[in-house]
Amino acid sequence: MSKETILVVDDEEDIVNLIKFNLQNEGYNVLTALTGERAVEISRMQKPDLLVLDWMLPGIDGLEVTRYLRTHNSKKQIPIIMLTAKGDESDIVIGLESGANDYMTKPFSPKELIARIRAILRRRNKKILEFSQTPETEEGLVIDHGRHRVTIDGRFVNLTLTEFELLSFLAGSRGWVFTRGQIVDAIHGDNYAVTDRSIDVVVVGLRKKLGSYAHLVETVRGIGYRYKEDNNP
């Protein structure tokens, strides 16, 4: 049985209790919070392995909680599944850009939620093993998988989790061309509710932050994206 700790954050107690019941049946330890402020407080005291986080919370909403976690180094790698009634494509993009790993709309299936939690934790544990390797460098650009950070000429670049995972995935297979669907599956898993346009938005944001190194993430017309290969025209 799993012993990972999941923090469930929602202002509706019935939803919190439903998720808690199903997670405990699967062997997870469960912490709960009804507000964003309480979620931040719990995260300060103990580092959960994953958050199931409602967007529309009173006071500090889910986006603000996500941004807080992504800007504090000790909590930066905690995976977040955003659970919300907001299901428009633009909302999904906003959720991703704030740093969420996955996005589910209400009403939801507890079985699907648990499947997504398992997939995210499985990929996280795999990455911990794989990314203990030497950081990848491209002149002044350094992608440090183990520390989950990117620097340019020694300056930290504040990427969202999705931006980092996209860059890391492409850089790990430089020169190879991937469709948008393949990129989504690689960094978020199968059946993830993200459209091709969402990946394009993430790439635009990533390139802006990379500045003079933006050219390393190349668009391959009609197919998708690749990380520039050495001596590639």
Image (cartoon, rainbow, N blue to C red):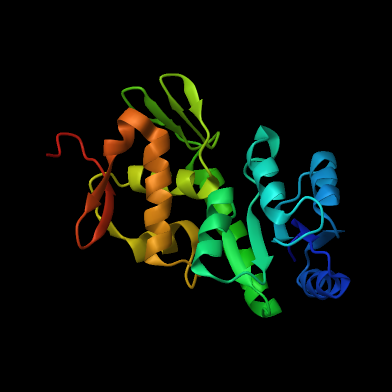
Quarter placement of the N terminus: bottom right
Q: Quadrant of residue 46?
A: top right
Locate residue 221 relative to residue 211 in the image: left or right: left
Q: Residue furthest top?
A: 154
Quarter of image, res 119: bottom right
Q: Position of residue 55 (x, y in %)?
A: 70, 61
Considering only vertical position in the picture, is 174 above or below 186?
above
Give the image location of residue 28, x and y in percent.
Answer: 78, 63
Front residue of 138/94: it is 94
Which residue: 42% across, 67% down? 195
Name the residue located 83 percent from the left edge and 74 percent from the top edge.
21
What is the residue that sits farthest to the left in this orientation?
A: 233
**Which residue is drawn at the image coordinates 41% and 54% (left, top)?**
201
Residue drawn at x 43%, y 51% is 202
Whole-percent x and y of residue 196? 37, 65
Location of residue 4 in the rendering, given as x and y in whole percent from the top left corner: 74, 56
